[in-house]
């Protein structure tokens, strides 16, 4: 279990750095100077910090998929709930989202559809891997029976 938490912290650190880069990516098209003039350095730091936190939570919580006793559906739903809760909490509190803005619903819908697509791809990947393992076991068993 110690390795699980160590991996979680490493993934969270990577996610934090990635989140800051994504946060910068949202600031750069309009110019950091424009945001600085309008909101100040504190807002930029808070924006980047929250972007980093969002990345840390999303990447850190991917280690849920390493819990072998959990099924793929349980892992995906748990990660989805963690990620969406964090996204909504941070997004609405930072003013990135608004209930009056239809784009917000579109973004959240894209997240839901994206999770479904990822879950389905993972299911297909695991099914293919299981078929490969079963085929290898059958080949091994047939070889043992011939001896």
Image (tube, helix red, strand yellow):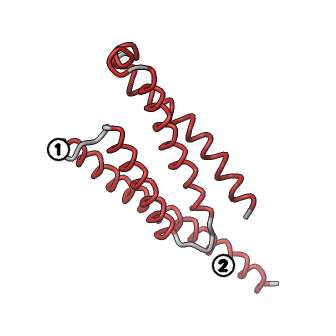
User: Against 34, is 104 above or below?
Assistant: below
The label number, if any, that marks residue 66 in the structure image: none
Question: From mark 1 to mark 2, how far is it between C-alphas?
Answer: 58 Å
Q: Quadrant of the N terminus?
A: bottom right
Q: Position of residue 30 (x, y in %)?
A: 33, 18
- Residue in the image at 60% along x and 46% along y: 12
Query: Which is more toward the observer, 124 or 62?
Result: 62
Q: Quadrant of the C terminus?
A: bottom right
Secondary structure type for disc 2:
helix
The label number, if any, that marks residue 138 in the structure image: 2
Image side of residue 95 versus residue 65, left or right = left
Q: Position of residue 53 (x, y in %)?
A: 51, 42
Using the rendered view, name the quadrant where residue 29 is placed.
top left
Secondary structure type for disc 1:
loop
The label number, if any, that marks residue 100 in the structure image: 1
Query: Which is more toward the observer, 131 or 93?
Result: 93
Using the rendered view, name the quadrant where residue 13 is placed.
top right
Q: In the rendered structure, which disc, 1 or 2, sits on the residue that comes first in sequence?
A: 1
- Residue in the image at 27% along x and 52% along y: 109
Total marks shown come to: 2
Query: How many other residues sit within 10 Å of disc 2, few (<14), some (14-19) or many (≥20)?
Result: few
User: Against 89, is 124 above or below?
Assistant: below
- Residue in the image at 67% along x and 45% along y: 10
User: Against 95, is 35 above or below?
Assistant: above
Q: Are marks 1 and 2 in contact (CB under 8 Å)?
A: no
- Residue in the image at 40% along x and 20% along y: 40
Residue most extreme to the right:
147
Query: How many other residues sit within 10 Å of disc 1, few (<14), some (14-19) or many (≥20)?
Result: few
Q: Nearer the viewer, mark 1 or mark 2?
A: 1
Q: Position of residue 3 (x, y in %)?
A: 74, 58
Image side of residue 76 versus residue 6, left or right = left
């Amino acid at each position: 279990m110690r390795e699980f938490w160590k991996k979680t912290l490493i993934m969270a650190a990577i996610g934090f750095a990635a989140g800051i880069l994504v946060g910068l990516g949202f600031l750069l098209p309009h110019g950091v100077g424009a945001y600085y003039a309008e909101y100040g350095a504190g807002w930029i730091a808070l924006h980047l910090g929250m972007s980093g936190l969002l990345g840390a939570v999303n990447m850190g919580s991917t280690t849920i998929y390493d819990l072998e006793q959990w099924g793929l559906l349980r892992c995906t739903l748990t990660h989805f709930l963690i990620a969406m809760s964090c996204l909504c909490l941070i997004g609405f509190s930072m003013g990135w989202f608004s209930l009056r803005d239809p784009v917000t619903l579109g973004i959240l819908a894209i997240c839901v559809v994206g999770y479904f697509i990822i879950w389905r791809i993972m299911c297909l990947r695991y099914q293919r891997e299981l078929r490969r393992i079963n085929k290898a076991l059958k080949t091994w068993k047939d070889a043992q029976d011939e001896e």
